[in-house]
Amino acid sequence: MTTLKNTYLNRIRPYLSPPVVALVLAIILFLVGGFLAPGFTNTAQAVNIVRLAAFLGIIAAGQTLVIISGGEGIDLSAGALVTLGAILTYRITDGSDAMILPALAIVLLAGAGIGLLNGIGIAVLGMPPLVITLGMSGVVTGVIYFYTRGELIGDTPPAMGRLLSQALIGPIPGVIGLWLLLGLCMWLLLERTTFGKQLFSIGINRTAAHLSGVRVNLIVVVTYMVSGALAAFGGFVLLGFTQTVFLNLGQPFLFPAIAAVVVGGTVLAGGKGSYWGTMAGALVLQVIDSLLLALRVEEAFQLIILGAMLLILLTMYGRQRSVRQ
């Protein structure tokens, strides 16, 4: 009997990867929500949950790369970069569809530039990622206040609202298609490029990777540059949904973005994870958030529940840490 059980578990184990488990959990929570909150389980609500999860998932893309790189890497400047990306787009376009692409180019360059400074501080100067990215978050916030002078002048191009928020294919809005495209690009980057293979190797053991010929410092710097660009791009996309900006637009996404990566199974010690997992983690968090809203749970208790869940997951994944450095 035990042999049959072990054989069965061995057969299904390959299908029980963290992304699959997280996706199944999101579906179960959604179905359970129909019993807890009448009217919660319907097609419109499902599409809305995926749409909102898409914004979180896009913002969490760069965080996934940083955490996979190891070295206790977490990018705490991501929230400020989301705000910066949205404000730059809002002001540069000033409601003009013709300025969308120039604004996008400037947003990506600004995000990558901030990421470059983060990467140099970590790889070259040897500063802890939490310290340098937290400090950079303050610097970016100060730049935002200096740039805007407290006045949020500009407008959102109509095309951004149409492409990202409105339904393009049936009931599916454009942001979901963009999210799936980003997921494909992230998969190709992590699984089909030399950069991706080297990123996992430095996450597992930086010393061994260096001895194998991997330019560790360069990979770290590039990783933070890509993370910064993706965070700023998240602000660009988010503007299409909010249609307006405010000075702390991105900060509420920082904590959930990290949580989405962890829920999706990316190990905080580095070297193991996937963006598919982050996408599934974003869905889990958004289902929980939508369900709590449907149940009219106070915002304070929502934060407590999400925080407790993250602490539990951090404890679970912390047990997987081994001596790698």
Image: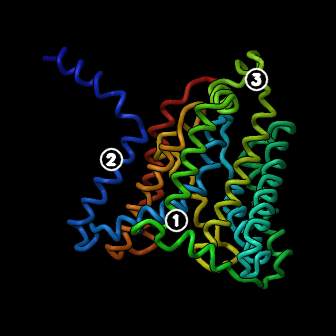
Helix, strand or loop for disc 3: loop
Total count of labels: 3
**Compared to 73, does 182 lie above or below?**
below
Q: What residue type is labelled 2?
A: Val
Look at mark 1 in the image and give the residue it sits on. 174
Q: Residue drawn 47% across and 44% down?
A: 264
Lower sequence index among marks 2 and 3: 2
Q: What residue type is labelled 1?
A: Gly
Residue 146 in view, yes or no: yes
Marker disc for residue 24: 2
Q: Give the foreground label among 1 and 2.
A: 1
Using a 10 Å C-alpha cutoff, classify the residue at mark 1 as few (fewer than 14 neighbours), some (14 to 19) or many (20 or more): some
Marker disc for residue 214: 3
Q: In this view, does 254 lie to the left or right of 105?
A: left
Image coords of residue 266 (percent x, y): 52, 39
Are the residues flagged by discs 3 and 1 in contact, CB closer than 8 Å? no
Closer to the camera in the image, 162 or 278: 162
Which quadrant of the structure image shows residue 48?
Answer: bottom left
Distance of label 2 from label 3 (alpha carbons): 37 Å
Which quadrant of the structure image shows residue 200?
Answer: top right
Q: Is residue 7 left or right of residue 17?
A: left
Helix, strand or loop for disc 2: helix
Using a 10 Å C-alpha cutoff, classify the residue at mark 2 as few (fewer than 14 neighbours), some (14 to 19) or many (20 or more): some
Q: Which amino acid does label 3 sit on?
A: Val
Distance of label 1 from label 2 (alpha carbons): 24 Å
Helix, strand or loop for disc 1: helix
